[in-house]
Amino acid sequence: MIAGLSLLCMAAAAMSGVSAAGQYGQTVVSLPSSNPVKQPWVWPLPQKWERGTSTLKVNGNIHFDFESHNTILSKAVKRYHNLIFQKDDYPMIPYNWTTTDSHARSSLNSVYIDIRDKSDHLDMDTDESYSLTIPVSGKAVITAKTVYGALHAIETFSQIVQYSPSLHSYVIPNAPWKISDYPKYKHRGLLLDTSRHYYAVKDIEKTIDTLSWNKMNVLHWHMIDSTSFPYKSKAYPQLAEKGSYSPAHQYDAKTISAVVQYAKERGVRVIPELEAPGHSTSWGYGVPEIVSCVNHVPYLGYTVQPPSGQLNIAKNETKEVVNKIIDEWSELFTDSFFHASGDEVVMACWTNDTTIASYLKEHNMSVNELFEKFVLDLQDHVRSHNKTVMVWQEMLLEYKFALPKDTVIQVWVGSSGVKQTTEMGYKTVVSSSDYWYLDVGYGKPRSNPYPDVPGAGYNHWNRVYSYDIRANLTKAEADLIIGGECTLWGELADHTNFEGKIWPRASAVAERLWSGYETPSGENITSADAILRLLPWRERMLLRGTMASPLNQGFCTRNPLDCFQPPE
Ligand SMILES: *[C@@H]1O[C@H](CO)[C@@H](O)[C@H](O)[C@H]1NC(C)=O
Ligand SMILES: *[C@@H]1O[C@H](CO)[C@@H](O)[C@H](O)[C@H]1NC(C)=O
Ligand SMILES: *[C@@H]1O[C@H](CO)[C@@H](O)[C@H](O)[C@H]1NC(C)=O
Ligand SMILES: *[C@@H]1O[C@H](CO)[C@@H](O)[C@H](O)[C@H]1NC(C)=O
Ligand SMILES: *[C@@H]1O[C@H](CO)[C@@H](O)[C@H](O)[C@H]1NC(C)=O
Ligand SMILES: *[C@@H]1O[C@H](CO)[C@@H](O)[C@H](O)[C@H]1NC(C)=O
Ligand SMILES: *[C@@H]1O[C@H](CO)[C@@H](O)[C@H](O)[C@H]1NC(C)=O
């Protein structure tokens, strides 16, 4: 079998005389008897969808009709003109699979977009729902409460359009379409670590693009860490001057604002993480007096990963510097969430610092008490900017701090943490490393934290997809999950390999957080069905320029049922 036979042209060849009834009552004679295309090739799977059996040509000058003053929408329409019309004469899609007529019956010339709410405010509570109808003749119609719902609708539309080499045309298979869609979880994110390795802005923006195509809506920007301080602060320029890898490895205010705006135009929120007070060596190059145990060698006993260095929690100056950075970030990152971090602290770093030891003695305090006071003050400062505070799970589960009930806890150590945080009544973002860490399994970098966490091996796409974040929870506990994030920590990732590590595994997370685990009518959404959509979705991401990794041999992309068997 040669490549280059399209989805549509092979339909005729593969006829076996069986009829398939469309939901709209039309009947197509002559579809393959064992047609496996149960679900549309849309990723993530829409909540409700109906399709027919007619093929439409898409006019190359298709017109999107909407109120012209909507700049987010006009820019999106321009982008999607390019994304929709990407010619692929030899599509790597399954052989002989189709559910649509082999000839085009009419053409689609325009899409009408109706947005109810004119505000372009983007936040966790933004309504992202939409509906999309594509009739056999006449206009397609998108309806959405907000422009962000409309962006998702256009994305779905773009995924329905296929290039047909046999018809030499872009087509919409399976018209008429009727889709009504909304996300199961509000927070659907990816963590990117730009401290261990620096990412150029174009790579961050490319990641934002691919997030938006997967209907993910959060970029968790882990900007600073022990290894480097790429943030160019206005008040403390010496932090980046001395703490970044080089002047070429920095993010200034203008750049950050541009990234935040770029993301907003794609429906993606950018949440900054201010790593503190652990993992803070890099602050100490610019402002030495605020960091304890800077780069102690050997590092063992002072940190879980070199270089050692934690913010000096006994000094007023530390608070002054940190609060100033919080002030700057609160303005630059317009989102209402702010990640105040708080992970992986080693007490010996502090107790061996004489300034801290004498402070504790003088104030008759334990190091844990001082630590708690420091982080609660820091978080209060974040709250003074009207931000919702997000922290890593240790703040609650390991250090057992008295966190206000509006704090959002991000679970990472292992999936059991989700039960603990939700039992305690906290809103939770799920990132369990045993399922959703995308950086692990490539061999242990020296002193990898928590090397003995079960499942610290490579999380294959199906393991990622198999993770039910509601496992073992009561309904009330499950309702406290606001969403999840997969993470790409930076030890072994940089511009050379980050995309292949993120995609398409983050797509598996994207679908669980958008589509959920069951359809609205109660059927399980299974990986056996998902792989049949994920394969073409990976190919489409490639076509759009994202270096998504293969899911199996090319043979399996062409003959999925021969490879991905038996289904669970
Ligand atoms: C596709 O269909 C044709 C015609 O029925 C058949 O000869 C061919 O073997 C099929 N190819 C594959 C890979 O199934
Ligand atoms: C810190 O200092 C104490 C006492 O001075 C010592 O016993 C301990 O080993 C030191 N900790 C580390 C990690 O070196
Ligand atoms: C540090 O701040 C506290 C509270 O504002 C104040 O009471 C104390 O005097 C300050 N210490 C120094 C050394 O400035
Ligand atoms: C120090 O704190 C401990 C426990 O909080 C208390 O029992 C003790 O009396 C305090 N000592 C002084 C000198 O205040
Ligand atoms: C925070 O919100 C309150 C109430 O909505 C408002 O009065 C106040 O000005 C806001 N503060 C900041 C720093 O935005
Ligand atoms: C649910 O609980 C079972 C039994 O304790 C455990 O084996 C399993 O790992 C838990 N699942 C998750 C995802 O936490
Ligand atoms: C759906 O999945 C759940 C949980 O994995 C399982 O218990 C249930 O039996 C499945 N339902 C069907 C109809 O397969």
Image (spheres, helix red, strand yellow):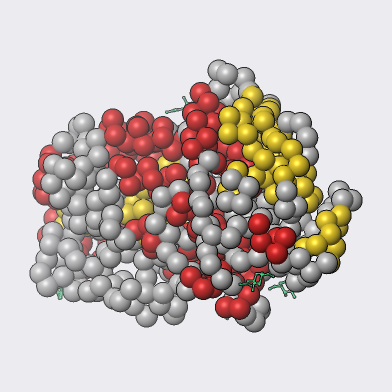
Q: Residue at x 78, y 35 (%)?
A: 137
Quadrant containing the N terminus in the rendered view: bottom right
Question: Looking at the picture, how far across and down is residue 119, in whole percent?
Answer: 58, 25
Q: How many marks?
A: 0
Question: Looking at the picture, how far across and down is residue 196, in whole percent?
Answer: 24, 57
Q: Residue at x 71, y 66 (%)?
A: 14
- Please give left or right for residue 25 compared with residue 5 in the image: right
Establish if 25 lies above or below 295.
above
- Please give left or right for residue 318 compared with residue 238 in the image: right
- Please give left or right for residue 247 compared with residue 74 in the image: left
**Is any part of residue 428 visible from this angle?**
no
The furthest residue to the top:
69
- Give the camera-side residue of 236 and 355: 236
Q: Quadrant of residue 360?
A: bottom left
Question: Looking at the picture, how far across and down is residue 100, in whole percent?
Answer: 74, 54
Establish if 459 lies above or below 284.
below
- Please give left or right for residue 489 compared with residue 168 in the image: left
Quadrant containing the C terminus in the rendered view: bottom right
The furthest residue to the right:
25
- Give the camera-side residue of 298 and 52: 52
Establish if 177 lies above or below 554.
above
**Is any part of residue 221 visible from this angle?**
yes
Q: Residue at x 54, y 31 (%)?
A: 77
- Give the camera-side residue of 429 and 254: 254
Q: Residue at x 20, y 57 (%)?
A: 227
Question: Looking at the picture, how far across and down is residue 338, in whole percent?
Answer: 41, 43
Q: Quadrant of residue 518?
A: bottom right
